Image (cartoon, rainbow, N blue to C red):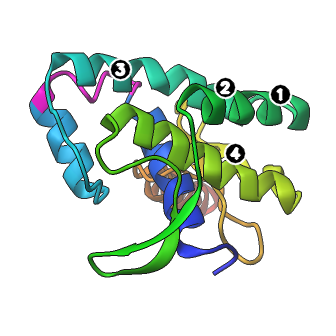
Amino acid sequence: MLFANDTEEGLRSAAALVNTEDGEQLPDVGSLHRFARNWNWTGNLALDDAELGAVRRLRPRLRALWDGDEDYVVETVNSLLREFNALPQLVRHDSWDYHIHAVPREAPLSARMAVEAAMAFVDLVRSRELSRLRLCASPDCGNVLVDLSKNRSRRFCESGCGNRAAAAAYRARLAERAESA
């Protein structure tokens, strides 16, 4: 583990949220509920059209963090923290040991998502690790990823692009062998 658990989860969930924009993977409140459940979002879940809209509007703001330089990331993170009145506090709940929450559990889901992501990006900036933010190496994929591997070798997103690239390389090697035989 490179960062605290809540930082890594914040980064992963931010990337997953950003990646729902491609092909609109949050088309309705039910899909938002599944996303929140899959990423273990606790606290207030209104799960209505207003919340769905707020979460959708958050995605491009978070997506821009993958393209920005350090100053842009800092400006955006600070803006999110101010906008949602973040007040970091240590909390313990469910199966989690102490970790940081910066907005109350009653805050809207979009606010909690924004602040959790912002707090995770704070750790990336402070440790000079923004280079861990990447775009998927697959030429036909626009997804983002966070490379949390020790050797900084992750190149593909969670959508199966790595498997498709490996299968394509394997087929190319087979074709090359058959051609040279």
Dot 1 falls on a residue whose secondary structure is helix
Query: Label 1 amino acid?
Result: Tyr
Label 2 and label 1: CA atoms lie apart by: 9 Å
Q: Residue at x 16, y 45 (%)?
A: 34
Indicate the quadrant where residue 100 lies: bottom right
Dot 3 falls on a residue whose secondary structure is helix
Query: Label 3 amino acid?
Result: Ala
Q: Is residue 107 above or below residue 131?
A: above
State the quadrant of the N terminus.
bottom right
State the quadrant of the C terminus.
bottom right
Disc number at residue 176? none
Dot 4 falls on a residue whose secondary structure is strand
Q: Earlier in the sequence, mark 1 or mark 4?
A: 1
Disc number at residue 54? 3
Q: Is residue 164 visible?
A: yes
Q: Earlier in the sequence, mark 4 or mark 2?
A: 2
Contact between marks 3 and 1 (CB within 8 A): the answer is: no
Q: Nearer the viewer, mark 1 or mark 4?
A: 1
What residue is disc 2 on? 64
Residue 169, horizontal then vertical, whole percent: 56, 56
Disc number at residue 72? 1
Q: Residue at x 70, y 76 (%)?
A: 2
Contact between marks 1 and 4 (CB within 8 A): the answer is: no
Dot 2 falls on a residue whose secondary structure is helix
Q: Earlier in the sequence, mark 3 or mark 4?
A: 3
Magenta range: 21-29
Contact between marks 2 and 1 (CB within 8 A): the answer is: yes
Query: Label 2 amino acid?
Result: Ala
Q: Nearer the viewer, mark 4 or mark 2?
A: 2
Residue 128, horizontal then vertical, whole percent: 89, 57
Disc number at residue 134? 4
Q: Residues within 10 Å of mark 3 (few under 14, many from 20)?
A: some
